[in-house]
Amino acid sequence: MREHYEEQNEEIKIRGRIITASLFLEFEMEFAIYVHFRPKNQHTDTLNLYLKEFILPIQFGKKVKLFKELLKTKTYQNKLNIFLKSPPQLMKNSNDAKHLRSKKTLQKFIDTTITEILELRNTIAHGFKINRFFKTKIKKGTFILSNNRKRKVINIKTIEPIINNVYLASLIIKHLMKIDEDKPKQE
């Protein structure tokens, strides 16, 4: 019985880390979408209604798709250029970010990362653990999930790089939001 509870706790930890990372990313994408499409009317009640009715109800997958399309716009292409000219300290100090020195690699990194977390989040949210259907012993802390006839093996080692990328992508998106492409960046 104790082994069963330990396995459940490990599964909960893994699922929780994935959900937490995806919520962090979702918040940054929501804000980017909101700012890009917000109404010209700046009254608080109107903006709150807009958020409540048009931004927050959008499903995570739709937010990912919408943000990926935003990245292709001239506005975001300009923001990416400005960002790369003077990247924040997190980009300069991070070993994970050293390869993100061109607009193409940066955009591909964000695109790939948000797609991966969407797939992983959907798998853990809608997938069923199918460990018991395998005759061979599965390593402790490893779970095989099935969703839409696709299998995904997850454990801390498999999700850690994805989660790290999600946090980095979220911080990049947050910094992109601070860029006003009409104003030169202060040195």
Image (tube, helix red, strand yellow):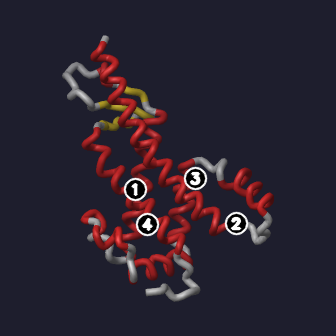
Report which quarter residue 36 is drawn in.
Answer: bottom right
In the rendered view, tell whether residue 90 sits above or below residue 134.
Answer: below
Residue matched to label 4:
172
Mark 4: few, some, or many residues within 10 Å (few <14, many ≥20)? many
Q: Please tell me the numbered disc located at residue 38.
A: 2
Mark 3 vs mark 1, CA separation in Å: 20 Å
Q: Considering the image in quadrants, where does the C terminus appear?
A: bottom left
Q: Earlier in the sequence, mark 4 or mark 3?
A: 3
Mark 2: few, some, or many residues within 10 Å (few <14, many ≥20)? some
**Element class at badge 1:** helix
Q: Which percent across, then down, holds residue 31?
A: 59, 61
Q: Please tell me the numbered disc located at residue 79.
A: none
Q: Earlier in the sequence, mark 4 or mark 1?
A: 1
**Element class at badge 3:** helix
Residue 68 left/right relative to 84 = right
Q: Please tell me the numbered disc located at residue 167.
A: 1
